[in-house]
Image (tube, helix red, strand yellow):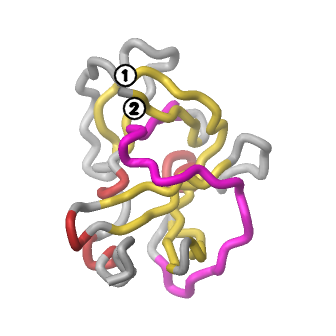
Amino acid sequence: MLALAFRAGDADLAVAARDIVEVLPRMPLRQPPLAPPGVVGLLPYRGMLTPVVDLCLIAAGRPAAALLGTRIIVVAVGTGESRRWLGLLAEDVVDLIELGDTLEGLRLPEAPWLGRHLPGSPGLPQLVDAAELLPEALLRLFVPENGA
């Protein structure tokens, strides 16, 4: 199994490839009024508005830099009829790594989206649980991926 590695500020992170719908270049987003912290825009994606979370803003306290390796990783969140799409804005999105054995890391109450570490990869990237980035109540406001 594979994971896509990237950076958010100084943090080495990864997301399981099985959760990825598509990786897109950075693009202009519609700015949502009164959005929760970290939600930097809405992406019109496959006929639906998809929230985009800036992982650099959440992890490093600064917006993602406009670099060549900065991408929007569209991931599937949830299962069945509650399945939604979410965009993750991150830097240095360039590496596929092996998702082998993982190790438990620190559990931070203020960052429940940070998961286990990948010890076989440089920088010990930490897995991102995208479902934990937005509250369930907010995710329910968005149209499911099947358009229902």
- Asked if the stretch drawn in magenta spans residue 59, the answer is no
Q: Amino acid at mark 1?
A: Leu
Q: Which residue is mark 2?
A: 126
- Could you say which is closer to the camera, residue 90 or residue 105? 90
> Residue at horizontal 73%, vertical 64%?
27
- Could you classify mark 1 by the number of other residues whose Cα lies within 10 Å: few (under 14), some (14-19), or many (20 or more)? many
> Residue at horizontal 24%, vertical 71%?
82
Eyeballing the image, is 40 above or below 90? below
Q: In the rendered structure, are the residues bearing label 1 and label 2 in contact, judged by CB atoms less than 8 Å apart?
A: yes
> Which percent across, then down, holds residue 80?
20, 66
Q: Quadrant of residue 26?
A: bottom right
Q: Residue furthest bottom?
A: 33
Earlier residue among tags 1 and 2: 1
Magenta segment, which residues? 11-35
Q: Which residue is mark 1?
A: 118
> Residue at horizontal 60%, vertical 55%?
72
- Asked if the stretch drawn in magenta spans residue 26, the answer is yes
